[in-house]
Image (cartoon, grey):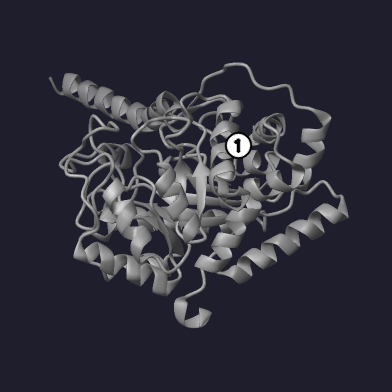
């Protein structure tokens, strides 16, 4: 009997070890996919131009997964080696802390959560198991550790001065023509302020951890605003208006991605700083509810902000580089090239055509869509840099 019991316990331990070792990777492989459909033939013009670009991507969820960001992964869409290969200068990495079961674009409540199971399966610190705030602080800790361990290959960005230093170092590295890739900048964001856990003063905690951008909602309504995918889809609450004011004053960029149309309208009416839509599409080329209407695009442009175009099917109704370029072209034609940006949503449970190492696909698609070289420079990163520089300055300092 005793031998039988020991055998059962041993089997359970092996099963548990296999689960914790294999399950996180299996989950990611099943959610962050590359569809394998044909890619564009990249011209010599595109290759040469791409090497000279300063590329900024406004949204990735890579910190959610239990991979070493410094190593080239065999799954997912993004890590430091692939960012280097894609010539990305600055990547905004978002902290995603809660996702409802049965998640959809139509209507979700905030009563359930998929990410808790992932947190436990990945053996994250126990403090993150029941605290959304601690999950964001863990993501920040992961990034800070990666920066520290990267031997200068990954650089944190929290101030405009950090951007200036990053660009100088990248320019010097490229001018030296050595084999060492120039550093890649990384800035922290948040996908939904439910991680404040109802306490608006926790915004100071996020800021202290290095977080400099935040979407007000994600896939469900919260105490600050309605989500485009929530049940009520309302506008900003009084607490939501207060959090927007505090964010702008501190130098945290307000992101309207996933906000309900009422929420977007309220933010645009009260904004005193540039507003971004970090990742998504436009309804003119892909009529999905989470994408921006023309009036909303005009509103974001009026704040001096940018619209980050994603690469997955719900953003551009396809995964082809041509569809990405088509959405970017609509923004350019509607309000001007200075309001166009990239917002991949890599590693955000998305299926895409290419990972970040192959961003030259977007450059080629923009050339084929008739964009000039200067327009491509602006859309691939110049515009985003302008907005980040402006938005990261606390309002008191800006005066």
Residue beneath disc 1: 356
Quadrant of the drawing holding the N terminus? top left
The outermost residue toward the left is: 1
The outermost residue toward the top is: 37
Viewer-nearest residue: 74 or 328? 328
At x 58% / y 54%, what residue is drawn?
A: 384
Tell me, yes or no, if residue 257 can be seen here: yes
* The quadrant where residue 134 appears: bottom left
Q: Position of residue 353 (x, y in %)?
A: 56, 25
Residue 32 shown left or right of residue 324 in the figure: left
Viewer-nearest residue: 6 or 218? 218
Residue 368 shown left or right of residue 250 in the figure: right
Tell me, yes or no, if residue 89 can be seen here: no
Describe the element under mark 1 as helix, strand or loop. Answer: helix
Number of marks in the image? 1
At x 59% / y 44%, what residue is drawn?
A: 332
How dense is the environment of label 1, judged by Cα within 10 Å: few (below 14), some, or many (20 and up)?
A: many
Q: Position of residue 279 (x, y in %)?
A: 46, 43
Viewer-nearest residue: 288 or 202? 288
Q: Position of residue 181 (x, y in %)?
A: 75, 48
* The quadrant where residue 160 appears: bottom right
């Amino acid at each position: 009997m005793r031998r039988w019991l020991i055998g059962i316990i041993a089997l359970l331990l092996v099963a548990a070890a296999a689960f914790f070792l294999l399950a996180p990777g299996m989950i990611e492989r099943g959610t962050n996919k590359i569809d394998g459909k044909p890619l564009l033939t990249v011209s010599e013009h595109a290759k040469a131009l791409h090497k000279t670009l300063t590329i900024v991507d406004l949204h990735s969820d890579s910190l959610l997964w239990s991979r070493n960001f410094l190593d080239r992964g065999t799954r997912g869409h993004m890590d430091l080696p692939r960012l280097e290969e894609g010539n990305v200068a600055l990547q905004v990495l978002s902290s995603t802390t809660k996702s409802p079961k049965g998640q959809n674009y139509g209507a979700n409540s905030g009563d359930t959560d998929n990410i808790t199971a992932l947190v436990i399966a990945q053996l994250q610190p126990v403090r993150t198991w029941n605290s959304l705030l601690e999950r964001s602080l863990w993501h920040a800790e992961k990034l800070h550790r990666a920066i520290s361990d990267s031997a200068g290959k990954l650089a944190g960005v929290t101030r405009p001065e950090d951007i200036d230093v990053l660009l100088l170092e990248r320019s010097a590295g490229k001018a030296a023509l050595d084999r060492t890739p120039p550093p890649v900048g990384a800035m922290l964001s948040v996908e939904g302020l439910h991680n404040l856990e109802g306490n608006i003063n926790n915004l100071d905690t996020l800021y202290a951890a290095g977080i400099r951008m935040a979407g007000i909602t994600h896939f469900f309504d919260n105490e600050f605003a309605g989500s485009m995918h929530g049940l009520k889809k309302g506008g900003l609450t009084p607490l939501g208006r207060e959090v927007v004011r505090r964010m702008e004053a501190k130098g945290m960029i307000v992101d309207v991605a996933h906000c309900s149309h009422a929420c977007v309208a309220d933010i645009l009416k009260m904004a005193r700083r540039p507003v971004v839509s970090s990742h998504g599409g436009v309804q003119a080329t892909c009529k999905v509810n989470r994408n921006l209407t023309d009036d909303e695009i005009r509103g974001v442009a009026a704040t001096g902000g940018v619209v980050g175009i994603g690469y997955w099917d719900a953003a551009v109704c396809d995964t082809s580089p041509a569809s990405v370029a088509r959405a970017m072209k609509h923004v350019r034609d509607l309000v001007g090239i200075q309001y166009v940006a990239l917002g991949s949503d890599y590693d955000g449970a998305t299926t895409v055509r290419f990972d970040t190492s192959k961003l030259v696909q977007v450059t080629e698609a923009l050339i084929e869509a008739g964009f000039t070289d200067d327009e491509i420079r602006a859309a691939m990163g110049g515009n985003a840099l302008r907005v980040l520089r402006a938005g990261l300055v606390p309002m008191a300092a800006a005066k």
